[in-house]
Image (cartoon, rainbow, N blue to C red):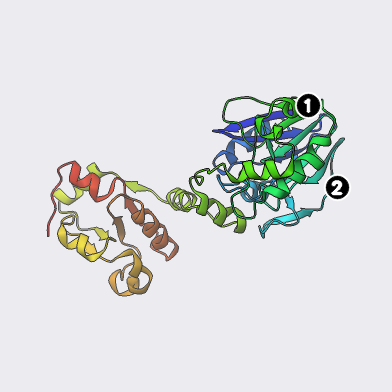
Amino acid sequence: MLFEQIATGGCQSYLVGCSSTRAAVLIDPELSRVREYRGHINQLGLDLRYVIDTHTHADHFSGGRELGKALDAPVVMHRLSPAPHAALRLDDGDMLIVGELRLQALHTPGHTRDSMCLVMSDRVFTGDTLLIGGTGRSDLPTGDPHELYESLFEKLLTLPPETLVFPAHDYKGRSHSTIGAEIADNPRLQKRDRADFVAMMQSLDLSAPTHLTEALRTNMTGAKPVSQLLAEAAAKLPFMSLAELALRVGGNSRDLVILDVREKDAFEAGHIPGAIHLPRGQLELRVNSELPDPTAKILTCCEFGKISTLAAATLRELGYLRATALEGGLKGWRDAGHPLTV
Ligand SMILES: [Fe+2]
């Protein structure tokens, strides 16, 4: 078996391949590492058959959809997953064949309703159902401490004690544990009575994970996080530096349209000399009257350089093929001591 554990902060992803056929699966990929996973897959000469999410993650962005699309592998989740991009949905007991490897789904609701563990001959990928020295929380959407109790004590912990445990998270740099070691030492598993366990889970009082709403929004629907939208817009554009713009403004360059896409108040409080005003929110509606020449060199600017990046990408889509955005925005312009007019 080819086996790579790839950590992103506290998130653990697993690339598991069959050494004779090179067929492979990737479990719980993280969106920010998609290029790196592809690098690993290429370097090892693997043929990715499935991308598996053990559950709908609430704390980070899944790379499943991106990776599945790029490598033509179906995204596999439990059948109760709300994600429309989950192309292969598993029931409890279903088995995936990956070359000579076999991965069997064990439905383990509790952390989320769609949580599943993946059981192999000597190991189990436990998602957020069982962590090293802990369990997943049961207080987020679709979580249920009663179900978590049953999933742990009536299912997962009945695996042979020597079974290796590979969780979806570890914040202390540990790679794995065993079922036996967790039964013996995991503090949460010492509450073996259902009522005691549920009471303990309900009294944890954990703070909400950062990005909870955005992570659920994107992981449940396959939509993009804002950071990805910005990165994709930026990848389609060249930028102009503050120094280059200062030269052009000073030289009274006539072939540059400086388009300030901030709101009216901000524009009127001070803008780059010669800039015209067209707020981002009205861009598509007023573009034909405000920017009659599609061959013009257009520079978008905003306060921090993010909205202007989206605006320039939109302009390119609309056919203004020389649209570019100001790196650093008005803030950078001001901080560098360049002139403003009102
Ligand atoms: Fe989770």
Q: Amino acid at mark 2?
A: Gly
**Percent of width and height locating residue 82:** 67, 59
Q: Position of residue 239 (x, y in %)?
A: 35, 47
According to the picture, the residue beneath numbered tag 2 turns out to be 93
Secondary structure beneath dot 1 equals: helix
Q: Nearer the viewer, mark 1 or mark 2?
A: 1
Quadrant occupied by the N terminus? top right
Q: Quadrant of the C terminus?
A: bottom left
In the rendered image, the vertical position of residue 339 relative to residue 153, given as above or below: below
Q: Nearer the viewer, residue 141 or 104?
A: 141
Does any portion of residue 199 appear in the rendered image? yes
Q: Residue at x 31, y 68 (%)?
A: 293
Furthest-right residue in view?
A: 100
Q: Can you tell which quarter of the image residue 284 is in?
A: bottom left
Crowd tier of the residue under label 2, counting other residues whose Cα lies within 10 Å: few below 14, some 14–19, many 20 or above: few
Of labels 1 and 2, earlier in sequence is 2
* Spot occupied by residue 145 in the image (x, y as percentages of width and height): 67, 48
Q: Is residue 78 left or right of residue 263?
A: right
Figure quadrant of residue 318: bottom left
Q: As displayed, is residue 329 above or below residue 185?
A: below
Q: CA–CA distance between discs 1 and 2? A: 22 Å
Residue at the spot 30% in from the left edge and 49% down from the top edge? 304
For residue 183, which quarter of the picture?
top right
Q: Which residue is mark 1?
A: 180
Which residue type carries mark 1?
Answer: Gly
Q: Residue at x 76, y 54 (%)?
A: 88
- Looking at the rendered structure, the secondary structure element under dot 2 is loop
